Image: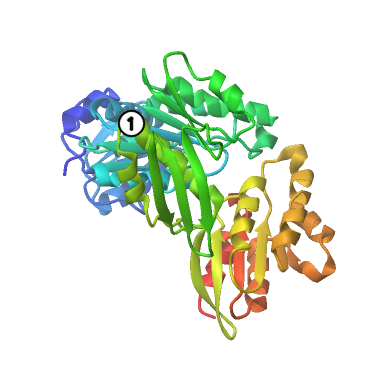
Amino acid sequence: MTLWHADELAQAVGSAAPGFAVTGVSIDTRSLQPGDLFIALQAERDGHDFIADAFAKGAAGVLVSRDVTGGPQLRVPDTLAALNSLGAAARVRCKAKLIAVTGSVGKTTTKEMLRRALAGFGPVHAAEASFNNHIGVPLTLARMPRDTAHAVLELGMNHPGEILPLAKLASPDTAIITSIERAHVGLMGSIEAIMLEKASVFQGLRGGGTAIISYESRFYEALSALVPSGMHQLRFGADPSADAHLISADSDAVSCHVIGSLAGKKLDFILAAPGAHMAMNAMAALAACHAIGLDVQKAAEYLEGFAPVSGRGLRRVIHVDGGKAYLLDESYNASGASIRAALAVLALQPGRHVAVLGDILELGDEAATEHLSLQHDLLQTADTIFTCGTMMGQLFQALPADRRGAHAPTAAALAPIVKSALRHNDAVLVKGSYGSRMRDVVSLLEGPY
């Protein structure tokens, strides 16, 4: 199916009609599909160096900022600006109700919950992976089919001023702030600055839009006051006065039975994702469904059975010496709050509890304090603790000797040590910031014993 006709492409990016239509949009030849428009962005690598590869893999044409050879091209002064223009044009032409999700933790899980719930109501379009920055957001919009009924975008940041332009580009009907935590505090300066940055998502709301805010947050009052006049607000939380009220969240090792109320309706469903934090994310997602006029009981039915994605809590069986163990893959990212939530899930698992933790990055002067503050939760939960990285090394030294597994400078160095230490029926949690590369540990554990 054609995604962009030639005249639409030309009008969107302000160039002459290219003479070709496209069925998709790509910025990476490794995942490019035949019929795609390849956009040659200039980042760490110059996309223009991959033009020949794009055409060899079947690109219908390329969007470039200098003349190239090999096939049809659309020439613009700045390819990133053109990508933004294409994303903006996609938002204008599509009548989808769009939900934007931001927050310190829980963004991607909430986005994936919304993807699942909304799919029952018609064609849904959501970001791949996180895709939440100045490239990922316009790219997700540019890929949005014109017949999309509902869309979900994730908006991320680690520096001041990043959320607002993304929010204005997305122009959401509803915006969720999942939580405000100390993630990126080293780059932002303070948690208050993080709160203000996240709240700027509300400035992008369409007229009459809805802001969805955690009633659990200590910043609730401040966030509520930052919602522009004329917009609606919904609160989610365990407090009975919350609009989306989480009544109970009963978890076992593999699931969470959620009971809640919203819009005068009782909600009763089971997630294939244990933990109170998962239940809270679900209530935020259902509040967004209600905000755009959907039946929340049906949305809860569609959400039934939701399971975490890889790197964000997915539980799987791995082979170890003498049998099998259970891996909780939380390797994609970490903050103090998300580590505590993951440890609570580890505590629900049978067998010996093994925690494998990498550094939490971008904490600045608060790094040592934040890492050491995890000691209490670890001692309440984990039988054996493995760590890697400079900051986790300090935490490791503070632990009692009988809880220490091993410490290594990097995830790659730690991985074989962890693998050799695991035994039958262990439950092992792997978590750390993206830059700590905890995926290296997961990859080795998932491989053959």
- Horizontal side of residue 297 vs 344, given as left or right: left
Q: Which quadrant of the figure has residue 287?
A: top left
Name the spot of residue 204 as percent of width and height, x first: 43, 22
Q: What residue is pinned by disc 1?
A: 292
Which residue occupies 61% across, 52% down? 341
- Horizontal side of residue 366 vs 130, given as left or right: right
The amino acid beneath tag 1 is: Ile
Name the spot of residue 380 as percent of width and height, x first: 73, 60
**Residue nearest the viewer, comparing 88 with 348:** 348
Name the spot of residue 284 as percent of width and height, x first: 46, 39
Q: Residue furthest bottom?
A: 322
Q: Which quadrant of the figure has residue 297?
A: top left
Tell me: residue 232, above or below residue 258. Answer: above
**Residue nearest the viewer, comparing 419 with 245:** 245
Q: Residue furthest top?
A: 229
Can the viewer see residue 25?
no
- Horizontal side of residue 180 vs 176, given as left or right: right
Which residue occupies 17% across, 34% down? 5
